[in-house]
Amino acid sequence: MTQSVGLTAAKSLTLGRSPQIDLDKLPPVKHKGLILLVSREEPCRKAIEYHLPQLERCWLICSSQTLDLAKKLKQDFPNLKIPEPIIINDIYEPLEFYQEVRKIYNYLPQEWVIEDVVADFTGMTAQASVGMAIASLCEQSSLQYTPAELKDGKPTGRSLNPIEITFATSKKHRGDKIVAT
């Protein structure tokens, strides 16, 4: 079974190796660092609480509209190192998110490695998620999302535990196709 891949950039990000998506919905390993897009309080809290007690630091990316929530999250988790929230000026510009997430990866705490951090792309806009995902793929960092709980096909207002998106390299590929193994 093959799936078409429409992003040429994805191939170049993996140095010519096709990324293979792991479709087993597994929770992520608990990380020391979490990069979070701030929009709704419930999924933000769920993502942070999931990684406790291993979580040491959380970077909050928000807009001017969600800054108060970011400040509240910082206040509500006093045992975490949470730098001042990163305020995005244009929530519809994926490159702004990309640049801010890359800065976080480039200035991790001393002795941290990329594998210590996971980026949760659940909140804000689709453009925010794309910018964060591309930045994380460039760093070969872990990604997760925090899905909504559904009852009878409708959101309950609560969130489930995060789900990790993993990318593995595979030599089994033909042209622009990923071969599911």
Image (cartoon, rainbow, N blue to C red):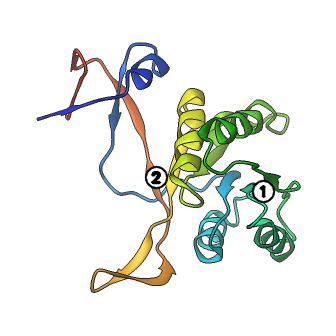
Q: Give whichever of 50, 10 is nearer the camera.
A: 10
The answer to whether residue 21 is above or below residue 37 is: above
- Say which mark, if any, is on residue 42: none
Tell me if residue 52 comes above or below residue 128 in the rendering.
below
Q: Looking at the image, is mark 2 or mark 1 earlier in the sequence?
A: 1
Q: Residue at x 43, y 42 (%)?
A: 166
- Say which quarter of the image contains residue 8: top left
Image disc number at residue 164? 2
**SS at circle 2:** strand
User: Which of the two residues, 145 or 126, is positioned nearer the viewer here?
Assistant: 126
Decide: few, some or many residues near mark 1? Use Cα within 10 Å; few <14, some 14-19, many ≥20: some
Vertical arrangement, residue 87 with respect to residue 12, above or below:
below
Q: Splitting the image into 4 quarters, where does residue 48 fall?
A: bottom right
Is 144 positioned to the left or the right of 7 in the image?
A: right
Q: Amino acid at mark 2?
A: Glu
Left/right of residue 165 with respect to residue 109 in the rendered view: left
Which residue is painted at 53% across and 32% down in the image?
137
As helix, strand or loop, the secondary structure at mark 1 comes to loop
The image quadrant where one finds the N terminus is top left
Residue 118 in percent (x, y) is at: 61, 48
Name the residue type under label 1: Glu
Residue linked to disc 1: 56
